[in-house]
């Protein structure tokens, strides 16, 4: 974990309200880090529904496989998250570690192992000693309280420089419900149906199938429209939990994703995902610039997404942004290599609202001094107009600096 907070970090953090049916506790189990918390236990009341989306990596971690299998039950009583060790590429030992962790947690909480969900983040390929959870989880179960949201977000950090949290209160029917979320992630980030690790909690009385629909739809233009370095983690996990406690206050039970009463909740839920995914982009390893890539005039939205990702993942584009250089030639390169419909002579490119290229050539009004000044801003928007259709899309990323190399060159040291 870096000691220097990203210059793109939010100026302040929201007050995270209590969510009925959720209690949190953290501890230092000595998984890898010294002198800091590295394990989180979330206790969930009986009746809590769960949903999740995970990495599409063909080399998933043991906790990802565990959660996929347990998700079919649709119910959760506990979430255990550790940082410092991903428990990925650890073979039979990794599977045994997840089983033992779940057994320890189930005993501490008083539930079945099928109601325990697990997530691990950190170094890949190192065995996880699950015996370190023995005793620790029992103590956490006894001391968990409803107000430990910031502590929880800090406990799951690895190379993150700040905890990532978001909250919203919205009406469901005539009752107020709350949504809280946390995330971690700074490197090895180009999600594919999930984020690195993210957990959403609500007291809304939603069925597991409704939660699953909300997640699947919600990640598409948030976490799946995010990239730091183009590398999808083995551990990507996004879990959502609905305790249903707000039903006691008159919130209607929702069992159908198309229920019109879900409209305001859905909007707030998606905003939480958008907020957290932007925070991840702001904390990209070594980042000094938040970068938004907008592609418009594409033939289809998927085509616009692929072109935007091609630009956002280009080391040449990202290093140009780091150097505050509006190098549209590198953007042209990234558009051309994406393999999507594009016409060089219709292409226009802008940096922070200043058009630098038009109709396949440098804009006649181009002013180097004006553009250079605009590139000093902490947020840079690259807009590409293809001129081929009406579809558009956008993705978030960050610049690529020397510090990214330093962080990842020393990651296991």
Image (cartoon, rainbow, N blue to C red):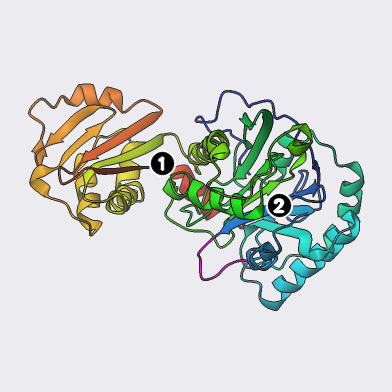
Rendered view: 165 above or below 39 = above
How far is disc 2 from disc 1 in space, using C-alphas? 31 Å
The quadrant of the image that shows the N terminus is top right
Rendered view: 114 above or below 326 = below
Residue 330 lies, in percent from the top left, at 23, 46
Residue 356 lies, in percent from the top left, at 17, 32
Residue with the mark numbered 2:
49
The residue lying toward the viewer, choosing from 247 and 8, is 247
Whether residue 58 is in magenta: the answer is: yes
Q: Residue furthest bottom?
A: 92
Using residue 80 as the reference point, say whether residue 410 is left or right of it.
Answer: left
Residue with the mark numbered 1:
396
Residue 213 lies, in percent from the top left, at 54, 52
Crowd rating for badge 1 (residues with CA inside 10 Å; few <14, some 14–19, many 20+)? many
Rendered view: 395 above or below 216 = above
The stretch of residues the image draws in magenta is 55-61
């Amino acid at each position: 974990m870096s000691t220097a907070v990203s210059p793109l970090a939010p100026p302040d953090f929201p007050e995270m309200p209590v969510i009925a049916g959720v209690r949190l506790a953290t501890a230092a189990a000595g998984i890898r880090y010294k002198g800091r918390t590295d394990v989180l236990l979330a206790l969930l009341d009986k009746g809590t529904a769960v949903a999740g989306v995970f990495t599409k990596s063909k080399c998933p971690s043991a906790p990802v496989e565990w959660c996929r299998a347990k998700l079919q039950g649709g119910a959760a009583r506990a979430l255990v998250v550790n940082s410092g060790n991903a428990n990925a590429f650890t073979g039979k030992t990794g599977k045994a570690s997840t089983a033992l962790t779940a057994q320890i947690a189930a005993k501490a909480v008083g539930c079945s192992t099928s109601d325990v969900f697990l997530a691990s983040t950190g170094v890949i390929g190192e065995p996880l000693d699950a015996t370190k959870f023995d005793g620790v989880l029992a103590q956490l179960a006894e001391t968990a309280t409803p107000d430990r949201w910031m502590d929880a977000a800090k406990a799951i950090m690895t190379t993150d420089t700040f905890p990532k949290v978001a909250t919203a209160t919205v009406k469901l029917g005539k009752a107020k419900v709350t949504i809280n979320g946390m995330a971690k992630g700074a490197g090895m980030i180009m999600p594919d149906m999930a984020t690195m690790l993210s957990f959403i909690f609500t007291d809304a009385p939603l069925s597991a199938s409704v939660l699953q629909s909300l997640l699947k739809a919600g990640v598409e233009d948030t976490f799946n429209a995010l990239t730091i370095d183009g590398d999808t983690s083995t551990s990507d996990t996004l879990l959502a939990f609905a305790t249903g406690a707000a039903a006691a206050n008159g919130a209607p039970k929702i069992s159908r994703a198309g229920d019109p009463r879900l409209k305001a909740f859905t909007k707030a839920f998606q905003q939480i995902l958008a907020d957290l995914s932007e925070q991840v982009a702001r904390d990209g390893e070594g980042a000094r610039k938040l970068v938004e890539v907008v592609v418009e005039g594409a033939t289809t939205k998927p085509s616009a997404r692929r072109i935007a990702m091609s630009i956002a993942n280009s080391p040449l584009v990202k290093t140009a942004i780091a150097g505050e250089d509006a190098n549209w030639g590198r953007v042209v390169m990234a558009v051309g290599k994406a393999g999507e419909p594009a016409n060089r002579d219709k292409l226009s490119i802008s940096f922070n609202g200043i058009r630098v290229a038009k109709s396949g050539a440098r804009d006649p009004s181009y002013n180097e001094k004006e553009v250079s000044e605009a590139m000093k801003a902490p947020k840079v928007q690259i807009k590409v107009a293809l001129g081929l259709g009406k579809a558009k899309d956008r993705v978030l990323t960050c610049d690529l600096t020397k510090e990214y190399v330093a962080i990842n060159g020393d990651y296991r040291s």
